[in-house]
Image (tube, rainbow, N blue to C red):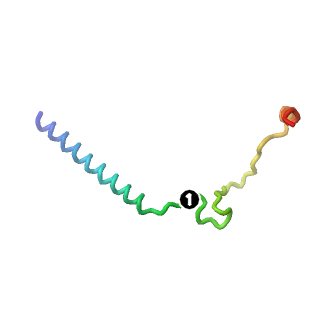
């Protein structure tokens, strides 16, 4: 029984040390990495992110319901 408790304690100690080391290394990397804003390094768009999709964006389909809505909104 005592051996089981010691084994559990040792495991928890090792897991705690590993978590501390991991958290410390993540914090060190985050602190030393330069923050780059979205679109940084792009030659086009003045820092605005642009997509690479070749699909044409369709905002609406012309239907009778759309025409009724558009006429009412004018």
Of 9 and 68, the residue lying toward us: 68
Location of residue 59 (image quadrant): top right
Of 54 and 29, the residue lying toward us: 29
Spot the residue most to the bottom: 43
Q: Which residue is mark 1?
A: 37
Spot the residue most to the front: 74
Residue at 75% x, 49% y is: 57
Mark 1, secondary structure of its residue: loop
Location of residue 54 (image quadrant): bottom right
Residue 19, given in percent of the width and then of the height, sits at 30, 49
Q: Quadrant of the C terminus?
A: top right
Please give left or right for residue 38 compared with residue 57 in the image: left
Image vertical order of residue 33 relative to residue 15, above or below: below
Residue 18, given in percent of the width and then of the height, sits at 28, 50
Please give left or right for residue 14 compared with residue 6 in the image: right
Image vertical order of residue 11 relative to residue 28, above or below: above
């Amino acid at each position: 029984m005592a051996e089981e408790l010691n084994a559990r304690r040792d495991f928890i100690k090792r897991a705690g040390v590993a978590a501390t080391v991991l958290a410390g290394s993540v914090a060190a990397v985050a602190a030393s990495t330069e923050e780059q804003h979205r679109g940084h390094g792009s030659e086009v768009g003045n820092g605005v992110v642009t997509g690479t999709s070749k699909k044409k964006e369709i905002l609406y389909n012309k239907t009778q319901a759309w025409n009724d809505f558009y006429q009412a909104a004018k």
